[in-house]
Amino acid sequence: MPPVPIADDLFTWPDDEPRLIGGSCTACGAHVFPLRNGCPRCGATAVERTLLERTGTLWTWTSQGFLPKAPFNGQFAANDPFEPWFVGVVELPGQLRVESILVGCPEDGPSIGMPMRLVTMPFRTDEDGREIVTFAFTPDEGDQPVSLRSTGEAGRA
């Protein structure tokens, strides 16, 4: 059974070079993610589907040092023993900032200002046995495979 995305119209799938699917307001030019019907800046309803940049800069980050509470159902965080993971905000040039899981980072953490690129990663397996994938950002070091700290599985670049 082929993997499926965590939500429709969140990122391009399947895609060797995934892109987040956002919107661009035709009235004021503001970008939104995820795609929605209205502009948060000016209130206009003319928002067009836009593929966002797939590379950006790490703006800030933190580590998630405990298992999240329900309704979180990602299996990548349910390892025994539990291993903390990184969450960050990536600034996409000229567009917006996106909160995301960070993968493939050094054990001591990423560095603010480091270049990042969008990847997909396994998130969980559903009740039908399908692998559910989500998006994440990883340090932008060319086309090297991404190693997911918490699962040991390779990410899809």
Image (tube, grey):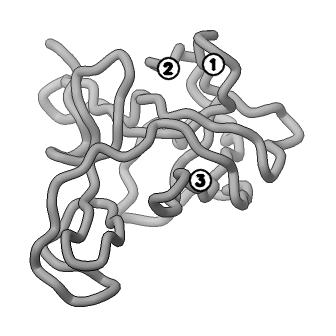
Residue 61, picture quadrant: bottom right
How packed mark 3 is, by other alpha carbons closer than 10 Å (few <14, some 14-19, many 20 or more), is: many
| In front of the other: 37 or 67 | 37
Q: How many marks?
A: 3
Quadrant of the image occupied by residue 116: top right
Name the residue rendered at 47%, 19% in the picture: 157
Q: CA distance from mark 3 to mark 1?
A: 19 Å
Marks 2/1 in contact by CB < 8 Å: the verdict is: yes
Mark 3 and mark 2 residues within 8 Å of each other at the beta carbon: no
Q: Label 3 is placed on what type of residue? A: Val
Res 105 seen here: yes
Whichever of callouts 3 and 1 sits on the residue coming sooner in the sequence is 3
- The residue that disc 1 covers is 147
Numbered badge on residue 90: 3
Q: Is residue 109 left or right of residue 42?
A: right
Give the residue type at disc 2: Gly
Residue 113 lies left or right of residue 56; in this view the side is: right
**Residue 66 x/y as whole percent:** 66, 58
| Residue picked out by circle 2 | 155
* Vertical comparison of 17 with 105: above or below: above
Tell me residue 19's x, y (percent).
Answer: 35, 36
Q: Which mark is residue 131?
A: none
Q: Is residue 150 above or below residue 73?
A: above
**Residue at the location (68% across, 31% down)?**
139
Residue 65 seen in the figure:
no
Structural distance between the alpha carbons of marks 2 and 1: 6 Å
Disc 3 or 2, which lies upstream in sequence?
3
